[in-house]
Image: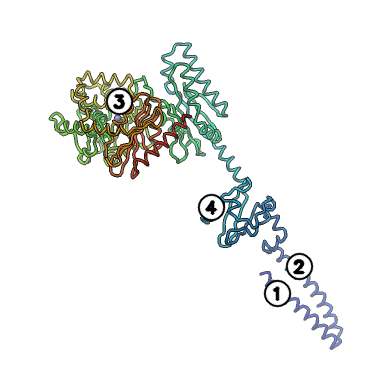
Amino acid sequence: MIRKIAQLRNLIIILLVAECILLFGLYLLLDSSLLFAFSVYALIKNIILFFVLSYITYLVDTNSMSVSEALDVDAKNAFIFGGLGLIQYDETRNVVWTSDLFKEMNINIVGVKLLEWQPHLASLFEDEDIKIVDIKGKKFEAYNSQETKLIYLKDVTQFLSLQQDYLDQQVCMAYITIDNYEETLENADEPKMALIQSKSRQVIVDWAYSNGIIIRRFKSGGYLAFFNERIYRKQVENKFAILDTFKEMSKELDEVMTLSIGIGRDSRVLRELDDMASNALNLTYSRGGDQVAVKSGDDNVKFFGGNSDTFEKSSKVRARVIAQSLAGLIKNSSHVLVMGHKNSDLDSFGASLGVAKIAIAYGKKANIVVDFESIEKKTKDVATMIKNHDKYKGMIISYTEAMEHINKNTLLIVVDNHKPSLAISNALLERVRNKVIIDHHRRGEEFIEAPVLTYLEPAASSTVELVVELCDYQNVELSINELDATIMYAGMLVDTNNFKQRVGVRTFQSAAYLKELQANMTLAYEFLEDSYEETLQRLSITQTAYRYNPYILIACAHENEEYTRTMLAKASNSLLEVSTIKATFTIGRISKTMVAISARSTRDINVQIIMENMGGGGHFSMAAAQFENRSIEDVRLLLEEKIKEYLDDRGEV
Ligand SMILES: [Mn+2]
């Protein structure tokens, strides 16, 4: 472009000069004064035109120079000012040239092997992506043009630190409540009450002030808190030590109070933060309190703490309210389906029986969905007996039969589980509109969609315990017979490991209620008796047990044999009877492709957390996990790692 304009300019100048020469030549030849005047005029005019032309091309020239033309020697300064650096390297990745930015930073690497100088630059040779690299404490965005063997670097130190500042200042919100607060106050005399109130408030407020958290009490034993990401990270680093501080304070007062904290973060919409925080708080409740649940944007929920077992809620108000709601739902339904979990155990089946009897008491047809393919062996025997029993004609059906009877007024009551993945039939969950959940497992993230009523009480020993209370609060006569009561009682025995674990006052009240209904203790224990073969099998597993540490035992069943989940649980249960042992883990193969762990513990160790970290779940003291296509040895190593993590987290070795 510029060259063309210059050519044109030169052409015009030649023409102008030619014009002058021509006119002057003619004057010399003809000696006319008129021609002389013309010549002088042409000369002056052409000199003016020459300057105008020169000026125009000069203007065009200066405005359209390429960067390299314009900068010339200033290039050095411009690159340094913009924080841009260039590195040229050869085939062997030796640096052959660097731009002046490096001299400015006192880096002289010409002749040095690139990766010897900065080994982490290797990532630049993996693909064409822009990466962030660290050079002499500064952060650079780097792009490697492998074709031209040039690395482009842009100083983004300031930008990144601003970005970090910005992220640090994001607002987080938390709801904090004191578990068991009302109950504790109720039972205290006036001076103690004042002490509990002031002490508990002091611990929370002190923690908030020393961490720069804004806190306001919004109800008795309930606080609302605001803080930023930086403060949140600090709390994560110290694993929310406030949970332990508070528990210690409570212990000093001889009371059982803990904190539940629900946090919402990673959203710029305050309304969303509020929702996330209150959802998170509900999650901590259903997992038994004494923990922090954090909901962040679309991420999974994170949990911290949870180191004490659920204590019993003394109020039975909830049971009564649920009992009435359940009665209302049953009355409004056309018929009732009851469904337990896959691999049904006696708690699942016993609870199903109890619920079915409530439905029948309201004059509704009730069916229990049983999958005889997926049922624990002893439960199978009991369920088979019920199926063939005259009194229970037609009560037990398969899920395919159940599917045939669904209409829009069908009520499906799910007992002893709340995760679709554990339900006997997913199709049934999807097809039935009205669903009720009655369960005693701590709430996991996976949850049956849109139930009309949820009764989740992780403080309960078993689902049977919950169902018995619901029976107790019905205003109609129930026809629970001796056999029902016995099976339900057996369900309680299974889930409490013969009343050794997870038992509260209400557990015995429910047991007493069943006894009043003529539950046959001897028969219940007979339901649970092991055969000679099973006993041998259990012993063969338990004898492999070794000490992970002075109070944890791990047993591994034989790689080539398949066991039932119940057998693994039994092994763990019986190992827990060993003195000084606080937690036991039994690993065994449950099918050709599946290995499972059954974990049991006393009040000191939360095996739920350990199993959750391995993709499983359960309760504080009873939990399990399963692994597809892994060897027992693989799973054992992973387990040891996760136990170590858990103990490290608690500051134990
Ligand atoms: Mn159960």
In the picture of the structure, the residue carrying the numbered disc 2 is 55
Q: Position of residue 248 (x, y in %)?
A: 48, 21
In the picture of the structure, the residue carrying the numbered disc 4 is 123
Point out the tag, 3 or 4, that comes first from the N-terminus: 4
Residue type at tag 2: Tyr
* Secondary structure under the numbered disc 3 in the rendered image: helix
Nearer-the-camera pick, 23 or 586: 586
Which residue reaches farthest top? 190
In the picture of the structure, the residue carrying the numbered disc 1 is 7
Q: Are marks 3 and 2 in contact (CB under 8 Å)?
A: no
Point out the tag, 1 or 3, that comes first from the N-terminus: 1
| Up-down relation of residue 80 to residue 179 (above or below) | below
Tell me the mark number nearer the camera, choosing from 1 and 2: 1
In 3D space, how far apart are the residues under numbered discs 4 and 1 (Cα atoms)? 50 Å
Q: Are marks 4 and 2 in contact (CB under 8 Å)?
A: no
- Rendered image quadrant of residue 288: top left
- Rendered image quadrant of residue 214: top right
Q: Are marks 4 and 1 in contact (CB under 8 Å)?
A: no
Tell me the mark number nearer the camera, choosing from 3 and 2: 3
In 3D space, how far apart are the residues under numbered discs 1 and 2 (Cα atoms)? 15 Å
* Secondary structure under the numbered disc 1 in the rendered image: helix
In 3D space, how far apart are the residues under numbered discs 4 and 2 (Cα atoms)? 53 Å
Tell me if the residue at label 3 has its CB under 8 Å from ligand 1: no
In 3D space, how far apart are the residues under numbered discs 3 and 2 (Cα atoms)? 100 Å
Q: Position of residue 75 (x, y in %)?
A: 69, 58
In the picture of the structure, the residue carrying the numbered disc 3 is 496
In 3D space, how far apart are the residues under numbered discs 1 and 3 (Cα atoms)? 100 Å
